[in-house]
Image (cartoon, grey):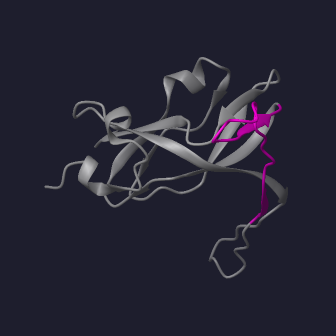
Amino acid sequence: MTSLIEAVDGIVHEPTQTRDGDGVDLTVTEIYTVENRGQIDFGGGELEPADVAPHSKEFHHEDDTYQWWHLNGGLYLIEYNESLSTSAYLQPHVEVLERGASHPSLQVKSLPMVPLRVSAAGIAIKENARVSVIRPV
């Protein structure tokens, strides 16, 4: 059986993202806003994706390497740097929860874009921030 770390590709910094066999932290590469609705039908013949657009980001300091997303309260879609090739449990990172944001916990076999709910106070997220964790099934 493949270990979870062997089933994850695109890890930004393995020593920081691994959890001693208990999981792997996932990092955000892009955050999207939903611009126009998609549609879902019973048979899939009329399935249409929602129109999404990358949310703007900015540097906090002129010498920064990575930019920040400043998100108001609402719903966004997050995309990960990493990819997954096995079953795992996906959960929001505790630091995300403690700052008033969350996403659903899911059992996944790959990493889809995931809806991120942000409280009315908003949140700032830096590129490559650890926002989720996957754990073995």
Q: Is residue 68 left or right of 9 when viewed as pictured?
A: right
- Residue 52 x %, y %: 77, 60
Single out the residue that lies furthest toward the right.
36
Estimate the x, y position of residue 11 in percent, counting from the top left: 40, 49
Q: Is residue 38 magenta?
A: no
Vertical order, 123 against 63 (above or below):
above
Q: Residue furthest bottom?
A: 45
Give the overall secondary structure of the magenta segment: loop
Which residue is farthest top? 98
Name the residue at the front extreme: 63
Highlighted magenta segment, given as a residue range: 50-72
* Residue nearer the viewer, 80 or 126: 126
Along the viewing direction, whichever of 125 and 121 lies nearer the viewer: 125
Please tell me whether residue 62 belongs to the stretch shown in magenta: yes
- Counting labels gives 0
Residue 23 image offset from top left, x and y in percent: 31, 36
Q: In terms of depth relative to the viewer, which is nearer, 22 or 13?
A: 13
Residue at the image point whose x is 43% and y is 47% from the top: 12
Using the image, determine if residue 66 lies above or below residue 9: above
Quarter of the image with the N terminus is: bottom left
